[in-house]
Amino acid sequence: MSIFSQKKLAFKLIFSYLCKQQEYILPIPSRSQNLLHETFFKIINNLIVMTQADLVRIFFANGETPTYWQYCFNEQCPLAQECAHQLSVTYKDPEQTDGYSIFPDANKNGKCKHFLQLCLVKRAYGMEHILDELKRKDSTEFRMRMTAYFGSNTSYYRFKLGQTALEPEQQQYILAWCKKHGYDNLKFDKYIEEIVA
């Protein structure tokens, strides 16, 4: 994920967080609001380079922590400053007194099989815009090919309607099929950058 994309996501998350913290919905015209967004983004753009600690902080601020999350309490680990399991200890609920954890001796010779880094992923939702661009003969073949690729009609329709996210490799497969059939510069219905483990 590019630094620009990381900064853009940080801007969105920080701006929405600040608005929530102030219990404040911007009561200003959309033109002024856009100017405020642009100004705020310029400030953030110059200040933020997303680190693993930033991604962990945002991940936990969004309440996305899986119930099976493993914490690592080994502060002496040489990988500690880059590992989401160790960095996440700061955000553990103080009321939680048991759960999943990684043992201190998991690190062997500077390597740990539990080492984890979060990353930003640009997921796509919905294929209606793509289908609108396809000719009728191509749309039938497209549906058949994608149904086979996704494994069932049900899965195909979930992806088509935007109920299930399309991962980057799935997006590439779909766009490669379209390009092979003469369709360039197609876009999915919407894109969302999400932090994933």
Image (spheres, helix red, strand yellow):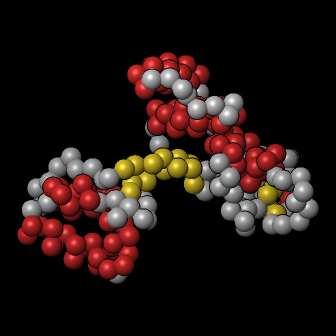
Name which quarter of the figure residue 109 lies in.
Answer: bottom right
Q: Which corner quadrant holds the C terminus?
A: bottom right
Name which quarter of the figure residue 153 lies in.
Answer: bottom left
Residue closest to the eye, 58 or 23: 23
Residue closest to the eye, 83 or 31: 31
Name which quarter of the figure residue 180 lies in.
Answer: bottom left
On the image, the x and y values in percent for residue 115 come to: 69, 56
On the image, the x and y values in percent for residue 127 come to: 29, 60
One can see residue 76 in this view: yes
Residue closest to the eye, 55 or 109: 55
Please indicate whether residue 97 sits to the left or right of residue 90 in the image: right
Q: Residue at x 86, y 47 (%)?
A: 76
On the image, the x and y values in percent for residue 118 come to: 61, 50
Please indicate whether residue 24 sits to the left or right of residue 181 in the image: right
Please indicate whether residue 108 sits to the left or right of residue 150 in the image: right
One can see residue 38 in this view: no
Q: Residue at x 48, y 50 (%)?
A: 121
On the image, the x and y values in percent for residue 108 come to: 78, 60
Residue 20 lies, with reference to residue 46, above or below; the image says below
Q: Which residue is drawn at 22% across and 72% down?
A: 143
Residue 143 lies, with reference to residue 56, above or below; the image says below
